[in-house]
Structures are given as C-alpha cells and as structure tokens.
Image (cartoon, helix red, strand yellow):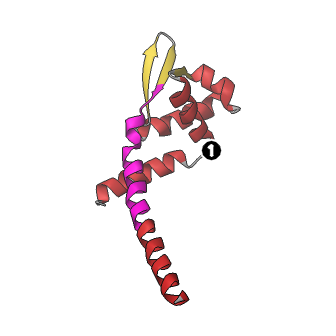
Amino acid sequence: MDLGMQAAAGELFKALSDPTRRAIFECIARDGEQTVHSLTARAGVSQPAVSKHLAVLKLARLVRDRREGRETHYSAQPRALVPLIDWMSHYGVFWRDRFDRLEDLLNKMEK
C-alpha cells in the first residue's frame, strides 16, 4: 500500500473517528441531502458544532456543500471512502494470512 493511500485513509479515519461526525455522515449518506438546520435538529449538538463537524467532513471530501438561498445543503460523497475500503482490504488479506499460518501451526502441534 503506497504512502498516498495510507495518508488518505488516515484522514478518513480521523474525520470519522468522532461519533457525532460519523452519525452526521451516516445520516446524510442514508437519507440524502440535508441542510445544516435539519442536521442540527437530529444531532443533539449546537448548530456551530454541526457546522464544525461538516467542515471536517468536507475537508476529508466525505460531503459536498451546495448553497441555495440562505441554506447550505450537504450531500454524501461515498466514493471518498475508497481509500478506507482499500486499506481494509489490504489488512484483511494480511490478517487472513496470519490466521492461516496460526491454523497450520496449531494443526502441526496437534500431530
């Protein structure tokens, strides 16, 4: 896995590490485009806090904003999760290999 992919995955992990931010992203991804006002009503935190979380998500390219009059609408950008999915696939192979080796060792020890 190259360093650029690791850096991108790191940014995604950082952006999604906060449970409130993760819930906001999941809400937008699940329910479609949302305004800051509608997200604030659901998030259980203040509007400035929601705006800060959205700024982090936007910086990580997980959401995109669109102005319409006085409101800003946010939509999820699920393709931004690709580096995270690639990272998980890479380490999934790594751990499967390790468990296969452990299984082989345990089988040899049983004999």
Q: Is residue 76 magenta?
A: yes
Q: Residue at x 62, y 34 (%)?
A: 49
Amino acid type at circle 1 is Pro
Q: Is residue 32 visible from the viewing direction of this image?
A: yes
Residue assigned mark 1: 19
Q: Is residue 109 above or below residue 35?
A: below
Specify the segment rendered in magenta.
75-94
Front in this rendered view, residue 86 or 15: 86
Q: Residue at x 49, y 40 (%)?
A: 56
Front in this rendered view, residue 47 or 6: 6
Q: Is residue 52 visible from the viewing direction of this image?
A: no
- Density class for disc 1 (Cα within 10 Å; few <14, some 14-19, many ≥20) is few
Residue 65 percent coordinates (x, y): 44, 25
* Dominant secondary-structure state across the stretch colored magenta: helix
Residue 6 percent coordinates (x, y): 36, 57
Q: Residue at x 40, y 52 (%)?
A: 9
Taking the image as shown, residue 21 lies to the left or right of residue 86, namely right
Displayed quadrant of residue 61? top left
Taking the image as shown, residue 38 lies to the left or right of residue 29, namely right
Q: Is residue 97 above or below residue 77?
A: below
Q: Is residue 79 magenta?
A: yes
